Image: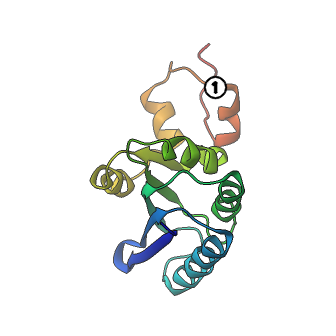
Amino acid sequence: MSGTFSITTDPLRHLVFVTLDGFFERARVEALRTALLDVRAGLSCPPNEHLMLVDCSGMHIQSQEMVAAFTAAAREPTLRSRRAAVVVGKSLVNAQARRVFKLERDHVSFFLDRHTAEEWLMIPPVSAVQTASRYRRGPVLPMSVDRGYIARNGA
């Protein structure tokens, strides 16, 4: 099955829904990237402030070349969203999707169903300051300093 995609938006919530199915070729990945740029230009929110739900549960395992193409598109600064929920289902696509978004872990989460993914997107994120005041003695990773965590190291 050739790769297909559909993109819909919820302009009031600044939410972009992307559904991916099948096995993609480079031309289809480029068409997806172009379509996402067009959709992003039509949103009324500031750049990179939209939310994105990507449902790739219908995708087949992709070639390494296509994983690299999806990774490049996912990391493109103009397409980056404030938060992204990725529906992976129960397949090996889960591992490939995690590779595509591996450097984006702070604002990307993975789900088995679309409903849960959309619920997570709509929950206001907790800031590092809120977390620090709520969990004063919580464990702190060395990298948390770069992410605005202000409490001292609990280790």
Task: Identify the residue shown where x is 72% and y is 57%.
Answer: 65
**Residue drawn where x is 61% and y is 64% of the image:** 80
Residue 91 x, y percent position in the rendering = 43, 42
Residue 74: percent from the left, percent from the top? Answer: 63, 61
Measuring from the top left, give residue 114's x and y in whole percent.
32, 55
Q: Is residue 106 visible?
A: no
Q: Amino acid at mark 1?
A: Leu
Q: Residue furthest left?
A: 115
Viewer-nearest residue: 58 or 102: 58
Q: Relative to residue 77, is residue 24 drawn left or right?
A: left
With respect to residue 122, does 149 lie above or below? above
Colour setup of the view: rainbow
The front one of 124 and 114 is 114
Left or right relative to 96: residue 130: left
Q: Is residue 3 above or below residue 90?
A: below
Observer able to see residue 25: yes
The residue beneath circle 1 is 141
Q: What is the residue that sits farthest to the front in this orientation?
A: 1
Looking at this view, is 20 or 42 the one in front?
20
Q: Is residue 136 above or below residue 39?
A: above
Figure quadrant of residue 153? top right
Q: Residue at x 71, y 61 (%)?
A: 72
Report the quarter where the C terminus lies.
Answer: top right
Q: Is residue 73 left or right of residue 133?
A: right
**Of the pair 4 and 101, the residue shown nearer to us:** 4
Assign a secondary structure to mark 1: loop
Give percent across and percent down for residue 19: 42, 66
